[in-house]
Image (cartoon, rainbow, N blue to C red):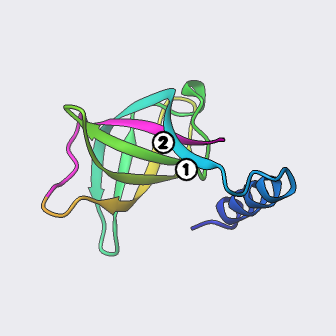
């Protein structure tokens, strides 16, 4: 993972501790920024997933996204390179026995803390 992702996690953790909400329930919500998989490049070390949206859809480098097909969560991606209208991502996690396909929906994961 990139250092900016670790930095973001550290900042959120410290903010929660300072605000006295360290015991808050943390939930993961999907944001409105979405894309679809337009191509999957199979490289020797990893697969690179190409998305059909980028900066214009609110996507940013380092964001973690969930991948869905017919409402089923297939796994997670890490956005590594962004352009105005497309993005590249690496697969962080994938449900065993499943594979990603062109047309699968990708939504940015956001975290919120609630008491």
Q: Which residue is identified by label 2?
A: 87
Q: CA distance from mark 1 to mark 2?
A: 6 Å
Q: Residue at x 50, y 36 (%)?
A: 29
Q: Label 2: state its secondary structure.
A: strand
Q: Relative to the observer, which residue lies in front, 2 or 53? A: 2
N-terminal of the two: label 1 or label 2?
1
Residue 59's label in the rendered image is none
Write the start and end of the magenta stretch as one range.
Answer: 98-115
Q: Magenta stretch containing residue 102, yes or no?
A: yes
Looking at the image, which residue sits at the far right? Answer: 18
Q: Is residue 108 magenta?
A: yes
Left or right of residue 12, residue 63 in this image = left
Say which quarter of the image contains residue 97: bottom left
Taking the view exactly as shown, the residue that stands out farthest to the bottom is 45
Residue 69 left/right relative to 88: left
Quarter of the picture holding the C terminus? top right
Residue 86: percent from left, percent from top:
47, 35
> At 30% from the left edge and 74% from the top edge, which residue is drawn?
44
Residue 33 coordinates in the image, percent (x, y): 51, 28
70 vs 81, nearest the viewer = 70
From the image, tell me which residue sits under label 1. Answer: 81
Instruction: Tell me which corner region of the image, top left, top right, bottom left or bottom right, holds residue 93.
Output: bottom left
């Amino acid at each position: 993972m990139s250092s900016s992702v670790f930095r973001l996690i550290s900042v959120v953790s410290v903010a929660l501790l300072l605000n006295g909400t360290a015991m808050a329930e943390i939930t993961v919500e999907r944001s409105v920024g979405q894309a679809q998989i337009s191509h999957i490049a199979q490289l020797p070390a990893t697969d690179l997933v190409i998305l059909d949206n980028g900066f214009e859809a609110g996507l940013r480098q380092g964001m973690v996204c969930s991948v869905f097909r017919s409402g089923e969560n297939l796994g997670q991606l890490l956005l590594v390179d962004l352009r105005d209208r497309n993005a590249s991502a690496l697969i962080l996690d994938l449900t065993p026995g499943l594979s990603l396909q062109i047309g699968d929906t990708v939504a940015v994961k956001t975290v919120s803390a609630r008491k």
